[in-house]
Image (cartoon, rainbow, N blue to C red):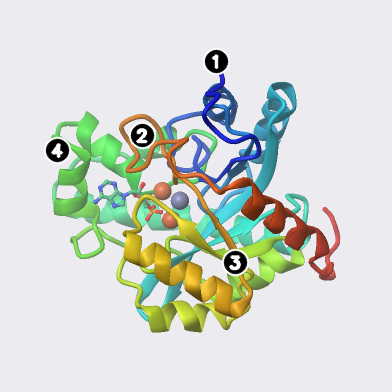
């Protein structure tokens, strides 16, 4: 049953599926959003567009608006920053090229992480990690799951703390993508480029401003990691610079998420403004595949 307390037109514009590190398949994710009474969702898997076709079909059936999206990890000032693309054309050539490059780099990285673990006498098999990722892009959560399965650790937090975390011994960084490259690929695909969870994860206000000046169209002002002060600062920035205001739950699945789907919504007027902003976006030269 839809939750009658949610305003019609409310949107959750940051969600993950099994095609990256989420627990729900795209169809399950859409059904969950529908049951909660959410009107529009953006599927924003890490560095992949693979889940969008299934999500679009499920959204049609459920009568939900799907915003096709992606969440790129980029490097800036020795920090990992996440840039969302919203309303991207999933057939755009430059975007697909970047996504293919990213997937290959993630495979290579996962192999290196497995090798590091093996050198530490942890018996991990790359093929098991590959299987965990299924059709999706391979990432550290899949490695963490295998470490739990083989009994090398007893939990995800332990896997990250001892082996996979940013400062742990088996960590290998991802593709060295610049924020400008992510923004350009998103723009060529007709999408809005958005700073995800800015101010969270070590990013200071001056970094957020520098990233905005690289050509972002909007910033997240709603995210489970934000304090009230973060939110206020970001809303102010958006108003001063004429940026769109977006956000969402960053849902990764039951028990895998800080934020619950339905609890972090973009209000209808903000969502409509974003949609209009995307519609008016000048079409950057690109060919569809
Ligand atoms: P990757 O993109 O392969 O670097 O993996 C990043 C993902 O790992 C994040 O999106 C989280 O889902 C997960 N993750 C990162 N740090 C932790 C942690 N300390 N505990 C549990 N999961 C984590
Ligand atoms: Fe994630
Ligand atoms: Fe993120
Ligand atoms: Zn995310």
| Residue 104 versus residue 233 in the image, above or below | above
Q: Residue 62, how many percent across, how many down?
A: 68, 23
Residue 128 numbered tag = 2
Q: Can residue 173 be seen from the camera position used here?
A: no
Q: Nearer the viewer, residue 268 or 184?
A: 268
Q: Residue 132, how many percent across, how many down?
A: 40, 33
The reply to whether discs 2 and 3 touch (Cβ–Cβ < 8 Å) is no
The reply to whether discs 3 and 4 touch (Cβ–Cβ < 8 Å) is no
How far apart are labels 2 and 3 at the CA level?
A: 39 Å
Question: Of discs 2 and 3, which sits in the foreground?
Answer: 3
**Which residue in the structure is indicated by mark 3?**
218
Q: Earlier in the sequence, mark 2 or mark 4?
A: 2
The reply to whether discs 2 and 4 touch (Cβ–Cβ < 8 Å) is no
How far apart are labels 3 and 1 at the CA level?
A: 32 Å
* 10 Å crowding of disc 1: few (<14), some (14-19), many (20+): few
Residue 1 numbered tag = 1
The quarter of the picture where residue 147 lies is: top left
**Which residue in the structure is indicated by mark 4?**
152
Question: Of discs 1 and 4, which sits in the foreground?
Answer: 1
Residue 107 numbered tag = none
* 10 Å crowding of disc 3: few (<14), some (14-19), many (20+): many
The reply to whether discs 3 and 1 touch (Cβ–Cβ < 8 Å) is no
């Amino acid at each position: 049953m839809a939750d009658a307390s949610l305003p019609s037109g409310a949107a959750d514009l940051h969600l993950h599926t099994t095609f990256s590190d989420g627990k729900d398949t795209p169809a399950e994710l859409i059904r969950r959003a529908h049951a909660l009474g959410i009107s529009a969702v953006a599927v924003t898997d890490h560095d992949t567009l693979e889940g969008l076709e299934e999500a679009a079909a499920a959204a049609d059936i459920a009568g939900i608006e799907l915003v096709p999206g992606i969440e790129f990890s980029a490097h800036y000032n020795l920090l990992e920053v996440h840039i969302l693309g919203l309303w991207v054309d999933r057939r755009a050539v430059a975007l697909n090229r970047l996504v293919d490059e990213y997937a290959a780099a993630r495979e290579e990285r996962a192999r290196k992480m497995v090798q590091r673990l093996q050198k530490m006498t942890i018996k991990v098999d790359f093929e098991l990690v590959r299987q965990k990722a299924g059709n999706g892009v391979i990432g550290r959560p899949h490695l963490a799951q295998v470490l739990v399965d083989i009994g090398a650790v007893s939990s995800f937090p332990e896997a990250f703390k001892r082996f996979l975390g940013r400062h742990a011994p088996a960590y290998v960084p991802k593709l060295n993508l610049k924020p400008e490259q992510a923004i350009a690929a998103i723009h060529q695909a007709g999408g809005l480029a958005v700073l995800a969870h800015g101010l969270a994860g070590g990013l200071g206000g001056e970094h957020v401003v520098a990233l905005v000046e690289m050509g972002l169209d909007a910033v997240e002002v709603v995210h489970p990691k934000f304090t009230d002060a973060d939110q206020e600062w970001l809303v102010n920035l958006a108003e001063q610079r004429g940026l769109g205001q977006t956000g969402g739950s960053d849902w990764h699945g039951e028990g895998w998420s800080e934020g619950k789907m339905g609890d972090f919504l973009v209000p209808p007027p903000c969502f409509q403004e974003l949609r209009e902003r995307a519609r008016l976006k000048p079409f950057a030269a690109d060919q569809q595949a």
